Amino acid sequence: MLEGEAYFNVSSNKRRPFIVETDKTSVTVLGTSFNINAYSNNNDVEVVLDEGEIVFEAEKHNYSILPGQKAIYNKANGLTSIVNLEKTLDESIWKNDVLHFSNTPLYDVLKTLNRRFNIRFVVENSKALEYTYTITSKQTTIADILLELQKITPIRFVLKDNVVHVEL
């Protein structure tokens, strides 16, 4: 069972399909490249198909996903939606050590950075959570990424004893 985010590139074998299971969903792979994001503390499970063919199952319903589409399953209400994406590679760019945010709320940016760098954030002013970020970064250290983020909004990130204080 997968908890987290993973990118798969699976060869076709229709007699023995490859199946990825998460807490409440599964993906049956029939030869493809796709990204799955299934963190236990996220409300959604997301699957993005780059190429090939997959069947996404949630709540005993099957959805055939086409290249360039994203399946989003909401764990709270049990609903699944399928959306067409302009750039599917943005969804799996993390596998190349690149961070990509597109109009992403600060709260979600901090969750991503927490997972990637195992660092805790303390938001000193809740008004900071009103900001969003659009950035693609190849920086590899938390300090460098925080410096880049500071250029976008008036928010300041102060790193003290492996805790980042988010100040406005």
Image (cartoon, helix red, strand yellow):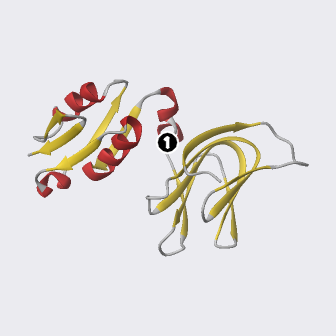
Residue closest to the far bottom: 77
Work out whether residue 153 or residue 22 is closer to the camera in this orientation and state it: 22
Neighbourhood count class around disc 1 (C-alpha, 10 Å): few under 14, some 14–19, many 20 upward: many
State the residue position of label 1. Answer: 91
Expressed as whole percent of the image width and height from the top left, the position of residue 120 reads: 28, 44
Q: Where does the N terminus fall, quadrant-wise?
A: bottom right
Q: How many numbered markers are drawn? A: 1
Q: Residue at x 8, y 46 (%)?
A: 168
Expressed as whole percent of the image width and height from the top left, the position of residue 114 reads: 35, 43
Q: Residue at x 21, y 39 (%)?
A: 164
Expressed as whole percent of the image width and height from the top left, the position of residue 57 reads: 68, 64
* Residue 129 vertical placement versus 114 (above, below): below
Q: Is residue 35 left or right of residue 142?
A: right
Work out whether residue 124 or residue 131 is closer to the camera in this orientation and state it: 124
Q: Residue at x 44, y 63 (%)?
A: 43
Q: Residue at x 65, y 39 (%)?
A: 8
* Residue 151 vertical placement versus 69 (above, below): above
Expressed as whole percent of the image width and height from the top left, the position of residue 93 reads: 48, 34
Work out whether residue 22 or residue 47 is closer to the camera in this orientation and state it: 22
Q: Is residue 101 left or right of residue 59?
A: left
Secondary structure at badge 1 equals: helix
Q: Is residue 116 left or right of residue 60?
A: left
At label 1, the amino acid type is Glu
